Image (cartoon, rainbow, N blue to C red):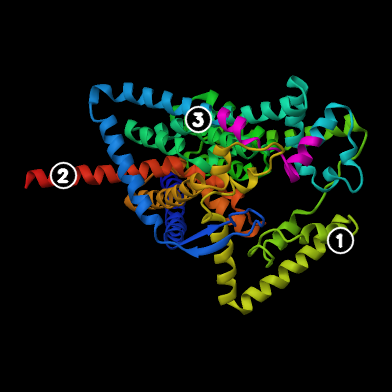
């Protein structure tokens, strides 16, 4: 009996620690979003996240909240029509997402460039039997971690063809993925809150998350990695809360594909393993231990199997590429853009200094990390400034790079698209995204503060665990505002819960006022 209480207390202590750590994180995010905004130059000539004082986003955030509360209250005020209205709203938002994605793909005329283009052209060459990109000094020699994404794109090219048709198909699959993300998010909200009003708020928030919607034309695995991670969370909750065995297998499938397509999805895997591990100990249930083993086996098996497949097809050895430690070292350096942003250190060290010797490059990377760590320890004020700039340059940039990363186009764009990138429509959307970002952070913070005395089961914290992982990882890794968008999307179910909490406070206030 004592052991059982001890195990249960482990689960509760883990949840409490996560809860309070996230209160600190979201307090900092909300405060910084209230005071400052990061922005890229209007001409997009530099990917530098400049900083400016901005207090106007508060008014916009209040307007967004008031509008959502008013609309949600009217939509769900009649008890007998709640489910019907919710289904209608779901259909409207789903149709909007699909329609927006299709139209945006047609009018944006965005084309893959830089790493997008290198992965895509590698996939096209694979479909032709050309595996030269694995050779010494070529792209996949540097970055074998891109193999999973290239394999996915090759599969699509073999089905629909290469060139414009293949690119369009990949963009449409992003749109389909966003639709799946909507379904998964609704499933998560049902599992966490069980209130139709929260689901209504989530639908409205997801349908107005324009940074995410505009990335539907960005072919780099970001969208699919995000929605597959959301799906894995939903299925894990189904598996644990409802005992649905299909939930475990769907979690395994979705998270495995997510990691193959986008390596950063590994943070969601770690979160799932952490939850299953604590539940296995506290509930003394062998199925969770088995689940962890299967999850690890499938992940390692899929990556190694993919590597073995392409080595067999190409007759070439796939090398380890640029050591990951170099990206961490670069994430501790100043640069032309901002603290921890890309400055060329990783490639310069690996290619120019070490001549593609990964072991030698790793040693230099570790020495650089030690050197920077000593500097931070000697000057804690500078360390706080550095990591403050690094944090805000990623989490306070309200577009998350959705404009600058989709700017490239071969064809001349129409007036509407030009206005969206450069004109008045762009300024309007930028102001909305700025207020929307502050609103999301503030709603999650309110949810955490309002539920700080409640004993939530550990699995209800899984989105928070992923967000913590995202914050910590991108404080260590190379910085870029685009990288943190998946975690922002994962905040939407929690923000919907925070908005519902405000609705509850308002209802209680009105009831108390009526009694008086």
Residue 97's tag is 3
Of discs 1 and 2, which sits in the foreground?
Answer: 2
Q: Front-most of 427 and 252?
A: 427
Q: Mark 1 and 3 residues: CB-CB less than 8 Å, in contact?
A: no
Task: Indicate which disc, 1 or 3, sits on the residue closer to the N terminus.
Answer: 3
Provide the residue span drawn in magenta.
Answer: 102-121
Residue 42, image quadrant? bottom right
- Quadrant of the rendered image containing residue 344: bottom right
Q: Secondary structure at mark 3?
A: helix
Q: Residue at x 52, y 26 (%)?
A: 99
Q: Quadrant of residue 186?
A: top left
Residue nearest the viewer, comparing 11 with 150: 150
Q: Is residue 338 above or below residue 254?
A: below
Residue 289 in percent (x, y) is at 59, 37
Q: What numbered label is drawn on residue 510?
A: 2
Q: Is residue 110 magenta?
A: yes
* Mark 2 or mark 3: whose residue is earlier in sequence: 3
Residue at point 26%, 32% (across, down) = 74
């Amino acid at each position: 009996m004592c052991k059982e209480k001890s195990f249960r207390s482990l689960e509760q202590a883990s949840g409490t620690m996560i809860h309070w750590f996230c209160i600190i994180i979201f307090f900092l995010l909300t405060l910084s979003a209230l005071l400052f905004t990061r922005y890229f130059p209007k001409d997009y000539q530099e990917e530098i996240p400049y900083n400016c004082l901005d207090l106007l986003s508060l008014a916009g955030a209040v307007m967004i909240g008031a509008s959502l509360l008013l609309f949600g209250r009217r939509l769900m005020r009649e008890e007998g029509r709640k489910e019907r209205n919710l289904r209608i709203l779901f259909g409207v938002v789903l149709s909007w997402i699909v329609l927006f994605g299709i139209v945006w793909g047609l009018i944006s005329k965005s084309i893959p460039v830089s790493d997008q283009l290198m992965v895509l052209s590698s996939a096209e060459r694979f479909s032709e039997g050309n595996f030269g990109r694995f050779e010494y000094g070529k792209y996949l020699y540097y970055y074998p971690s891109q193999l999973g994404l290239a394999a996915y794109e090759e599969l699509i090219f073999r089905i629909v063809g290469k060139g414009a048709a293949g690119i369009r198909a990949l963009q449409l699959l992003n749109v389909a993925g966003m639709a799946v993300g909507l379904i998964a998010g609704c499933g998560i909200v049902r599992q966490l809150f069980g209130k139709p009003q929260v689901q209504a708020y989530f639908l409205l928030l997801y349908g107005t998350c324009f940074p995410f919607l505009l990335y539907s034309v960005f072919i780099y695995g970001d969208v699919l990695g995000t929605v597959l991670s959301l799906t894995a969370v939903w299925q894990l909750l189904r598996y644990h809360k409802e005992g649905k065995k299909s939930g475990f297998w769907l979690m395994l499938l979705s998270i495995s594909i997510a990691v193959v397509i986008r390596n950063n999805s590994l943070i969601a895997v770690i979160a799932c393993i952490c939850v299953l591990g604590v539940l296995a100990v506290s509930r003394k249930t062998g199925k969770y231990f088995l689940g962890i083993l299967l999850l690890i086996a499938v992940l390692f098996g899929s990556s190694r199997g993919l590597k073995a497949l392409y080595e067999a097809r190409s007759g070439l050895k796939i090398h380890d590429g640029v050591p990951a430690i170099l990206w961490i070292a670069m994430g501790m350096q100043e640069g032309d853009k901002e603290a921890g942003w890309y400055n060329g250190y990783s490639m310069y060290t690996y290619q120019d200094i070490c001549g593609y010797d990964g072991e030698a490059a790793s040693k230099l990377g570790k020495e650089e990390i030690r050197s920077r760590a000593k500097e931070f320890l000697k000057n804690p004020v500078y360390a706080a400034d550095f990591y403050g700039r690094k944090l805000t340059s990623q989490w306070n940039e309200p577009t998350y790079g959705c404009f600058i990363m989709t700017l490239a186009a071969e064809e001349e764009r129409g007036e509407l698209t030009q206005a969206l990138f450069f004109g008045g429509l762009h300024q309007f959307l930028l102001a909305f995204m700025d207020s929307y970002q502050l609103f999301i952070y503030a709603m999650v913070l309110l949810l955490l503060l309002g539920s700080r005395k409640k004993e939530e089961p550990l699995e209800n914290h899984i989105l928070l665990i992923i967000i913590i992982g995202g914050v910590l990882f991108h404080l260590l890794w190379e910085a870029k505002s685009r990288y943190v968008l998946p975690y922002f999307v994962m905040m939407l179910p929690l923000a919907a819960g925070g908005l519902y909490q405000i609705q509850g406070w308002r209802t209680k206030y009105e009831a108390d006022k009526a009694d008086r």
